[in-house]
Image (cartoon, rainbow, N blue to C red):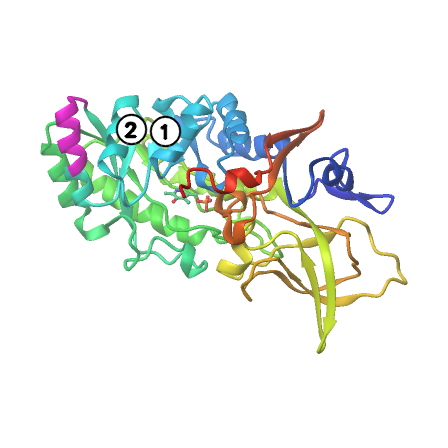
């Protein structure tokens, strides 16, 4: 997060003092950098400028309408995994013709809605789903564009919870069954075969698993051609990792060039990517306030007002996220080895372990790289309203989601 810097001992994001933003909007507070989001998306887009392509931002990483709208304006496509996400992208102004629909459990009504609005493609994850899409498409008399999500059986070398391309994962159709399912799809009256899709996991920091998977897709592509099945697009999924700590993930342009090369002899084939994390993770941070410090039995706790309800990555995946004080410490301040913990009644509610900090009540901290899988995974556990979200750019800052009120906590409930 190179756009964060200390000026006279105070942490700034672009021209905004974090302390001022916290005062204005309260804490916990999600802050996103609009220019950074655009830059990352454009890095993908530019790397593919020389061929037909579509960048489909995976909205589950962060689905705030303002972020989606900013990508709509750049011409982005979207990767969705539910009808809720479909309604979001439509609400944000997206062209349905640029939407691909992934997910293992698409319901009848989700498929109906996607067919009716006319999405670009269903990324089909099982033979049963293919049959369901065919029967709904027939009933509605609409041709359904499909791509099979292939499980290439490669090890993404990431956390097991976010590894999706291994044979034993629930995602995609097994590589060995793919040809048979394509042949079946070809005979269906209301199915149009459009592409091949894969997505092998998230937070990948090496290029090799991507290449292995692309190689397997290429073999399948050639086999399909040899039996007369044409493929209009290849969807490489998302999954490119970011730097949270000291990871050195591949550069976007290097990844794209390597994958592009695998299909250099088929320039008419459109290439799709579904990046999520690599676009928004390092664009966002979570600002939180220290409510108390507690020093007992050789433990030093900084108890903050954000918890696993706001940001679950550290609890769920043991993810390490950088935590910075908003006020730079003085050399003579007393430092402790802090556990940064939230308000939730769970011992797993830890945002950071063993951080050397000098903090007191009311001090502010920022949790870096919180733009992806932060707010989108937030919950109301322990009946905490979800935090506000704001967008910062070179011109200033603006609210993009109100802090939830207490009334909103029981909306829809009936005594
Ligand atoms: C989650 C997901 C993505 C995005 O993954 P990132 O690691 O955030 O880039 C892309 N495609 C599919 C099908 C997904 O489930």
Q: Residue at x 48, y 47 (%)?
A: 377
Q: Residue furthest front?
A: 415
- Looking at the rendered image, the quarter that the C terminus falls into is top left
As for residue 135 lying within the magenta part, the answer is: yes
Work out how far the residue at label 2 is from the one at label 1, CA to CA, in angstroms: 9 Å
Residue designated by label 2: 114
Residue 226, horizontal then vertical, whole percent: 16, 38
Q: Main secondary structure of the magenta part?
A: helix
Q: Residue at x 44, y 41 (%)?
A: 60
Indicate the secondary structure of the residue bearing disc 1: strand
Q: As drawn, is 368 to the left or to the right of 199?
A: right
What crowding class fits label 1: few (fewer than 14 Cα within 10 Å), some (14-19), or many (20 or more)?
many
Ligand 1 shows up in which quadrant of the image?
Answer: top left
Q: As drawn, is 2 to the left or to the right of 345?
A: right
Quadrant in the rendering for residue 259: top left
Q: Which one is nearer the viewer's eye here, 300 or 151?
A: 300
CB atoms of marks 2 and 1 within 8 Å = yes
Indicate the secondary structure of the residue bearing disc 2: helix
What crowding class fits label 2: few (fewer than 14 Cα within 10 Å), some (14-19), or many (20 or more)?
many
Q: Residue at x 53, y 48 (%)?
A: 250
Q: Nearer the viewer, mark 2 or mark 1?
A: 2
Q: As drawn, is 53 to the left or to the right of 403?
A: left
Magenta stretch: give its range.
132-142
Residue 350, horizontal then vertical, whole percent: 59, 61
Residue 364, horizontal then vertical, whole percent: 74, 50
Q: Is residue 254 visible?
A: no
Q: Is residue 232 visible?
A: yes
**Label number found at residue 99:** 1
As for residue 248 lying within the magenta part, the answer is: no
Q: Residue at x 34, y 56 (%)?
A: 154
């Amino acid at each position: 997060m190179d756009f964060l810097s200390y000026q006279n001992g105070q942490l700034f994001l672009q021209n905004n003092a974090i302390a001022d933003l916290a005062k204005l909007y309260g804490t916990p507070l999600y802050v996103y950098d609009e220019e950074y989001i655009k830059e990352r998306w454009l890095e993908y887009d530019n790397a593919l400028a020389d061929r037909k392509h579509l960048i489909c931002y995976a909205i589950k990483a962060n689905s705030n309408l303002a972020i989606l709208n900013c990508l709509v304006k750049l011409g982005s496509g979207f990767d969705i995994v539910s009808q809720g996400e479909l309604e979001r992208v439509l609400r944000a102004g997206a062209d349905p013709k640029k939407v691909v629909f992934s997910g293992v459990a698409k319901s009848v009504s989700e498929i109906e809605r996607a067919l009716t609005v006319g999405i670009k493609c269903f990324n089909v994850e099982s033979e049963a789903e293919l049959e369901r899409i065919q029967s709904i498409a027939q009933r509605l008399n609409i041709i359904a564009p499909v791509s099979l999500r292939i499980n290439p059986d490669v090890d993404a070398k990431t956390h097991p919870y976010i590894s999706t391309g291994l044979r034993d994962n629930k995602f995609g159709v097994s590589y060995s069954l793919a040809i048979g399912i394509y042949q079946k799809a070809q005979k269906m009256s209301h199915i149009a075969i459009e592409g091949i899709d894969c997505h092998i996991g998230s937070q990948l920091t090496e290029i090799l698993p991507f290449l292995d998977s692309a190689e397997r897709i290429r073999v399948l592509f050639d086999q399909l051609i040899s039996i007369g099945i044409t493929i209009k697009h290849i969807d490489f999924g998302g999954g490119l990792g970011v730097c949270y700590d000291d990871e050195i993930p591949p550069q976007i342009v290097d990844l794209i060039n390597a994958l592009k090369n695998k299909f250099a002899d088929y320039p008419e084939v459109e290439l799709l990517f579904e990046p999520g994390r690599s676009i928004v993770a390092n664009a966002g941070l979570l600002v939180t306030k220290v409510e108390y410090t507690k020093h007992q039995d050789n433990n030093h706790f900084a108890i903050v007002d954000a918890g696993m309800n706001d940001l679950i990555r550290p609890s769920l995946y043991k993810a390490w996220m950088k935590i910075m004080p908003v006020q730079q410490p003085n050399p003579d301040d007393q430092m402790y080895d802090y556990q940064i913990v939230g308000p939730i009644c769970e011992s797993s509610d830890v945002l950071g372990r063993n951080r050397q900090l000098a903090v007191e009540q009311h001090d502010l901290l920022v949790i870096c790289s919180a733009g992806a899988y932060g707010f989108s995974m937030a919950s109301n556990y322990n009946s905490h309203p979800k935090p506000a979200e704001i967008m910062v750019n070179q011109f200033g800052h603006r609210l993009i989601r109100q802090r939830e009120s207490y009334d909103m906590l029981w909306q829809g409930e009936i005594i």
